[in-house]
Amino acid sequence: MANSLSRPDQGDIIALFARAGYAARGLVYVLVGGLAALAALGEGGEATDSRGALESVLSAPLGQVWLGAMAIGLVGYAMWRCIQAIKDTDHHGTDTKGITVRASLLVSAGIHLMLASFVVRLIFAFGGSSGGSEGGSQGVAHWLMKQPYGPWLVGALGVILIAVGLAHAAKGWKMSFDRHLDMSPTMQRWTYPICRFGLATRGVIFLFIGAFFIIAAYSVNPNEAGGLAEVFDTLRNQPFGPWLLGFVATGLFAFGIYSLLESVYRRVNPDS
């Protein structure tokens, strides 16, 4: 008698990891946006980057368990990004624009794999911080500066980040994310404004970070590079700083909601 139980389809397993990855990314941005919003309101939050937000989870009940689940999700997201890039599941094509988008997916995979590694280090060094200048944007800038043509590499990365920021803003403005979401018209009416706001805000963040890298390249000083925490500091020091910080924090929270929606409604077709 044939065994009625069959092995799970490989595509289903990949889709599960992809959705877990979108959920993990969403939770990270909800944390980042929520903490920054509290800081803007003077309610005790901290405007920090994704690493700082993940460190804050340690003090929560079952913090290590939550971090472990998020690490698995981030690895799943990195895996899905690689599949998207290699198999071209979203049909970007092989022209210059398509290759650029697919290359950016591989970069995204690397970034989220590094973030997952950071989470694992947090779990096994409970109570201690794994952050610092050796990690994050300045760490990347320091490493690139040590390579041949280092300042040019740092500057090129800045240009790429600005291009990614513009692409995010365009994606939100044109609602081109629509083709990837399987959502009812009723859901679209109240979720799409959130998605557009979140994508536009993340685009602005990339513009800032790209500018920091270009400044670092021009000054040949990797310490001028910066990430999300430095963007928050820059905004806070402007006129109406708390208002600007609160606005951007709300946008990043919205991007987190967008990612959580993707974990449920995104079309994930590993075999396409």
Image (spheres, rainbow, N blue to C red):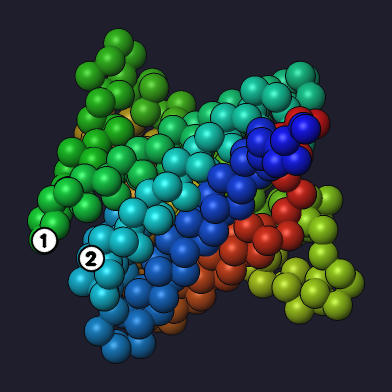
74 versus 108 height, above or below: below
Q: Residue at x 27, y 46 (%)?
A: 120
In the picture of the structure, the residue carrying the numbered disc 2 is: 58
- Mark 1 or mark 2: name the one nearer the start of the chain: 2
Q: Residue at x 23, y 65 (%)?
A: 58
How far across and down, in percent of the image, does residue 52 sit?
Answer: 27, 60
Q: Residue at x 47, y 50 (%)?
A: 73
In the image, taking residue 157 as reference, residue 192 lies left or right, namely right
Q: Which mark is residue 127?
A: 1
Q: Quadrant of residue 34?
A: bottom left
90 versus 189 height, above or below: above
Q: Are marks 1 and 2 in contact (CB under 8 Å)?
A: yes
Q: CA distance from mark 1 to mark 2?
A: 8 Å
In the image, taking residue 161 as reference, residue 226 lies left or right, namely left
Q: Residue at x 89, y 72 (%)?
A: 185
In the image, taking residue 222 as reference, residue 215 lies left or right, namely right
Q: Which mark is residue 197?
A: none
Name the outermost residue toward the front. Answer: 1
In the image, taking residue 214 as reference, residue 6 lies left or right, namely right
How far across and down, in percent of the image, does residue 112 sit?
Answer: 43, 42
8 versus 266 height, above or below: above
Residue 114 visible here: yes
